[in-house]
Image (tube, helix red, strand yellow):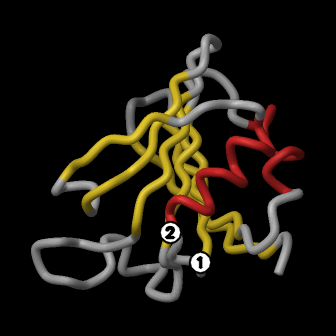
Amino acid sequence: MTDLYGFRENDLNALKAVIEMALGIQMAAHESFYLGGDYYLAKLPDGIEISLQRNRDLRDAGPRYDDFPNIATLLFVSSPTNVNTLHGQLACIEGIRYLQRTTLTPDGKLSVERIESGWRT
Protein backbone atom coordinates (compact mmCIF):
# COMPACT_ATOMS: atom_id res chain seq x y z
CA MET A 1 0.00 0.00 0.00
CA THR A 2 1.34 3.43 -0.93
CA ASP A 3 -0.06 6.84 -0.10
CA LEU A 4 1.06 9.76 -2.23
CA TYR A 5 1.22 13.28 -0.83
CA GLY A 6 2.36 16.43 -2.57
CA PHE A 7 3.61 19.94 -1.99
CA ARG A 8 3.65 22.99 -4.21
CA GLU A 9 6.90 23.88 -2.44
CA ASN A 10 9.99 23.07 -4.51
CA ASP A 11 12.67 23.24 -1.77
CA LEU A 12 13.48 19.57 -1.20
CA ASN A 13 15.86 20.25 1.69
CA ALA A 14 13.37 22.44 3.58
CA LEU A 15 10.61 19.84 3.14
CA LYS A 16 12.97 17.08 4.28
CA ALA A 17 13.64 18.97 7.53
CA VAL A 18 9.92 19.54 8.17
CA ILE A 19 9.03 15.88 7.47
CA GLU A 20 11.87 14.60 9.65
CA MET A 21 10.69 16.79 12.53
CA ALA A 22 7.01 15.85 12.11
CA LEU A 23 7.69 12.10 11.95
CA GLY A 24 10.76 11.90 14.20
CA ILE A 25 12.84 10.21 11.49
CA GLN A 26 16.05 10.74 9.53
CA MET A 27 16.00 10.64 5.73
CA ALA A 28 19.12 9.75 3.73
CA ALA A 29 20.08 11.50 0.50
CA HIS A 30 20.05 9.50 -2.74
CA GLU A 31 20.20 10.25 -6.46
CA SER A 32 18.30 8.69 -9.33
CA PHE A 33 17.76 9.92 -12.87
CA TYR A 34 14.50 7.94 -12.96
CA LEU A 35 13.24 9.56 -9.74
CA GLY A 36 13.95 13.12 -10.89
CA GLY A 37 17.48 13.58 -9.53
CA ASP A 38 18.17 14.06 -5.83
CA TYR A 39 15.68 12.49 -3.41
CA TYR A 40 15.45 11.44 0.24
CA LEU A 41 14.53 8.04 1.64
CA ALA A 42 13.81 6.64 5.10
CA LYS A 43 13.27 2.94 5.83
CA LEU A 44 11.59 2.44 9.19
CA PRO A 45 11.88 -0.72 11.32
CA ASP A 46 8.18 -1.57 10.86
CA GLY A 47 8.63 -1.88 7.08
CA ILE A 48 7.36 1.59 6.18
CA GLU A 49 9.36 3.43 3.51
CA ILE A 50 9.13 7.20 3.06
CA SER A 51 10.50 8.83 -0.06
CA LEU A 52 10.62 12.55 -0.86
CA GLN A 53 11.11 13.28 -4.58
CA ARG A 54 10.68 16.07 -7.10
CA ASN A 55 7.77 15.73 -9.50
CA ARG A 56 9.88 16.01 -12.61
CA ASP A 57 10.86 13.76 -15.44
CA LEU A 58 14.46 14.47 -16.40
CA ARG A 59 13.93 12.88 -19.83
CA ASP A 60 11.34 15.36 -21.09
CA ALA A 61 11.57 18.17 -18.48
CA GLY A 62 7.87 17.76 -17.57
CA PRO A 63 6.22 16.41 -14.44
CA ARG A 64 6.74 12.72 -13.69
CA TYR A 65 3.15 12.52 -12.50
CA ASP A 66 1.14 14.33 -15.18
CA ASP A 67 -2.02 14.06 -13.06
CA PHE A 68 -0.50 16.54 -10.61
CA PRO A 69 1.21 19.23 -12.74
CA ASN A 70 0.97 21.87 -9.98
CA ILE A 71 2.68 19.65 -7.41
CA ALA A 72 6.45 20.28 -7.30
CA THR A 73 7.44 17.70 -4.67
CA LEU A 74 6.05 14.23 -3.97
CA LEU A 75 6.07 12.27 -0.71
CA PHE A 76 5.53 8.52 -0.98
CA VAL A 77 4.63 6.55 2.16
CA SER A 78 4.68 2.78 1.52
CA SER A 79 3.96 -0.09 3.87
CA PRO A 80 3.43 -3.82 3.50
CA THR A 81 0.48 -3.55 5.89
CA ASN A 82 -0.92 -0.12 6.80
CA VAL A 83 0.17 3.44 6.07
CA ASN A 84 -2.60 5.03 8.12
CA THR A 85 -0.38 5.23 11.20
CA LEU A 86 1.35 8.36 9.83
CA HIS A 87 -1.74 10.29 8.63
CA GLY A 88 -2.12 12.35 11.79
CA GLN A 89 1.50 13.39 11.90
CA LEU A 90 1.56 14.27 8.20
CA ALA A 91 -1.68 16.27 8.45
CA CYS A 92 0.14 18.80 10.65
CA ILE A 93 2.62 19.75 7.91
CA GLU A 94 1.87 23.08 6.27
CA GLY A 95 1.24 22.90 2.53
CA ILE A 96 0.79 19.12 2.33
CA ARG A 97 -1.88 17.61 0.09
CA TYR A 98 -3.06 13.99 0.19
CA LEU A 99 -3.21 12.95 -3.49
CA GLN A 100 -3.84 9.22 -3.89
CA ARG A 101 -3.65 5.72 -2.44
CA THR A 102 -2.39 2.71 -4.38
CA THR A 103 -3.14 -0.80 -3.14
CA LEU A 104 -2.75 -4.32 -4.43
CA THR A 105 -6.09 -6.11 -4.70
CA PRO A 106 -6.50 -9.75 -3.60
CA ASP A 107 -6.41 -10.80 -7.26
CA GLY A 108 -3.03 -9.10 -7.75
CA LYS A 109 -4.12 -5.93 -9.58
CA LEU A 110 -3.19 -2.38 -8.68
CA SER A 111 -6.00 -0.16 -7.45
CA VAL A 112 -5.47 3.61 -7.47
CA GLU A 113 -7.83 5.85 -5.53
CA ARG A 114 -7.51 9.57 -6.23
CA ILE A 115 -7.95 11.63 -3.07
CA GLU A 116 -6.66 15.15 -3.82
CA SER A 117 -7.54 16.68 -0.49
CA GLY A 118 -5.73 19.64 0.91
CA TRP A 119 -5.08 19.38 4.61
CA ARG A 120 -2.99 22.44 5.28
CA THR A 121 -2.45 25.48 3.08
Residue flagged by tag 1: what amino acid is it? Glu
In the image, what residue occupies the spot 58% across and 42% down? 77
- Find the residue positioned furthest to the left: 59
SS assignment at label 1 = loop
Residue situated in front as seen by the camera: 94 or 62: 94
Give the residue displayed 53% in from the left and 48% down from the top.
Answer: 76
* Dots 2, 1 in contact, CB < 8 A: yes
> Helix, strand, or loop for circle 2?
strand
| Identity of the residue drawn at 38% across and 51% down | 39
Residue that mark 2 sits on: 73
Q: Earlier in the sequence, mark 2 or mark 1?
A: 1
Whether residue 27 is situated above or below residue 70 in the rendered picture = above
Instruction: Say which residue label 1 marks.
Output: 9
Residue in view at x 25 percent, y 47 percent: 31
Distance between mark 2 and mark 1 Cα atoms = 7 Å
Residue 8 picture location, percent across and down: 59, 81
State the quadrant of the C terminus. bottom right
Determine which quarter of the picture holds residue 56: bottom left
Q: Is residue 60 left or right of residue 99?
A: left
Q: Is residue 26 above or below residue 45?
A: below
What amino acid does circle 2 point to? Answer: Thr
